[in-house]
Image (cartoon, rainbow, N blue to C red):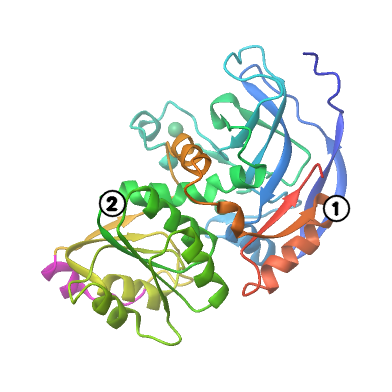
């Protein structure tokens, strides 16, 4: 198929200053021989996008000059490089947003999420996906079945974080788990715990909308921390034993302490969310006496095929998380909505080619 229908210029939602986004025309990217060009169909707004939008930095990553946000995306392939043989024009794909070097020690060990040379969409200095066309190296575009929507395919990104947490903390079928924080990452982590066969999935949050969504994603018990003490409630649910595994996804010091305190002896704690302050008080004797294993979780590796397979299986309907939809022209409104109405919306999605 010829690729002549691809235009040379496209619309992009560009941030020039904090909390300001304008729609501009920029060139459509030129692909290299091992890359594919994708017509972007859906982009989910993530907590990290909001952080760059509102604060201009996350740790060492600082936005300088104009910047394009968005990294949870999916679309249709409209052009392929000469060395691309397993993907075709017209294929629908989920895009894994971090392109790694493939040759460093971490890449070769299969832990490519720790590659120091990664180029990650919407992580400075690399622009993101609030554009009509995006290029990506062929091994980071994953075929999706026809019945999986583009917004569900975009959700494979936050789902991947949960899958990686499950792999890191060696989640076993039949086990009990507590997941703290029911933002989009926490909600997709519930789906991951379900996919890995956890029997009791206990979740905490303080927003009723999020706790309701958690039930739809597979939570068996929900705890509103405004009404109940999380550790006490979890002890009751587990007959005084505690959970096998706990994940903190909210970046809340209190939730991290509760996650630790809810573990059984020999339990496993995964840290997914990042607190605003680097150091928080933690019960060291509890960790030592109970031989708690603690896992850091940074993004994900080798999760996309599994994530697509599970979301395609129909065991959960992740599209219930999509509460708000905007065309690219209204990216500013979409960002403001996601930033200022956290108790009303779950996942806000932008459609660059609507
Ligand atoms: Zn994300
Ligand atoms: Zn590498």
Q: Please tell me which residue lies in front, 352 or 61.
A: 352
Number of numbered discs overlaid on the protein picture:
2
Mark 2 or mark 1, whichever is nearer to me: 2
Q: Is residue 348 above or below residue 94?
A: below
Q: Quadrant of residue 78?
A: top right
Q: Is residue 193 above or below residue 136?
A: below
Residue 20 visible in image: no
The answer to whether the residues at label 2 and label 1 have Cβ atoms under 8 Å apart is no
Instruction: Report the disc number at residue 171.
Output: 2
The residue furthest front is 314
Q: Residues within 10 Å of mark 2 (few under 14, many from 20)?
A: many
- 62 relative to 266 in the view: left or right: right
Q: Which residue is mark 1?
A: 329
Q: Residue at x 73, y 38 (%)?
A: 40
The residue furthest bottom is 227
Q: Is residue 21 above or below residue 142?
A: below
Q: Secondary structure at mark 2?
A: loop
Q: Please tell me which residue lies in front, 161 or 21.
A: 161
Expressed as whole percent of the image width and height from the top left, the position of residue 177 reads 31, 62
Residue 328 visible in image: yes
- Magenta span: 280-290
Residue 282 part of the magenta segment = yes
Q: Residue at x 75, y 65 (%)?
A: 19
Q: Residues within 10 Å of mark 1 (few under 14, many from 20)?
A: many
Expressed as whole percent of the image width and height from the top left, the position of residue 181 reads 46, 69
- Does the numbered disc 1 mark a residue whose Cβ is under 8 Å from ligand 1? no
The quarter in which the N terminus is drawn is top right
Q: Residue at x 58, y 40 (%)?
A: 97
Expressed as whole percent of the image width and height from the top left, the position of residue 249 reads 44, 64
Q: Quadrant of residue 346?
A: bottom right
């Amino acid at each position: 198929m010829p690729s002549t229908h691809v235009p040379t210029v496209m619309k992009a939602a560009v941030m020039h200053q904090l909390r300001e986004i304008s729609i501009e025309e920029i060139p459509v990217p030129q692909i290299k021989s091992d890359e594919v060009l994708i017509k972007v169909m859906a982009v989910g707004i993530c907590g990290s996008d909001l952080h760059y939008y509102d604060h201009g930095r996350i740790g060492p990553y600082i936005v300088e000059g104009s910047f394009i946000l968005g990294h949870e995306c999916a679309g249709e392939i409209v052009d392929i490089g000469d060395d691309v043989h397993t993907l075709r024009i017209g294929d629908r794909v989920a895009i894994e947003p971090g392109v790694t070097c493939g040759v460093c020690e971490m890449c070769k060990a299969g832990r490519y999420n720790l590659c120091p040379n990664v180029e990650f969409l919407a992580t400075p200095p690399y622009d993101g996906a609030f554009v009509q066309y995006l290029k990506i190296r062929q091994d980071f575009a994953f075929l999706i079945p026809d019945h999986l929507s583009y917004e569900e395919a975009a959700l494979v990104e936050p789902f991947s974080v949960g899958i990686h947490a499950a792999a890191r903390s060696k989640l076993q079928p039949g086990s009990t788990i507590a997941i703290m924080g029911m933002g989009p990452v926490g909600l997709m982590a519930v789906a991951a715990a379900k996919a890995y066969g956890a029997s009791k999935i206990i979740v905490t949050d303080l927003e009723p909308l999020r706790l309701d969504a958690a039930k739809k994603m597979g939570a068996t018990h929900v705890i509103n921390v405004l009404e109940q003490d999380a550790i006490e409630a979890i002890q009751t649910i587990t007959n005084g034993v505690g959970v096998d595994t706990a994940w903190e996804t909210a970046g809340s010091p209190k939730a991290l302490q509760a996650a630790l305190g809810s573990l059984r002896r020999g339990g496993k704690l995964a840290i997914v969310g990042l607190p605003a302050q680097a150091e928080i008080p933690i019960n060291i004797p509890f960790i030592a006496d109970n031989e708690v294993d603690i896992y850091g979780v940074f993004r994900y590796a080798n999760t996309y095929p599994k994530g697509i397979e599970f979301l395609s299986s129909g065991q959960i309907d992740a599209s219930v998380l999509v509460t708000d939809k905007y065309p690219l022209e209204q990216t500013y409104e979409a960002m403001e909505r996601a930033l200022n109405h956290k108790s009303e919306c779950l996942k806000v999605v932008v459609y660059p080619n609507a």
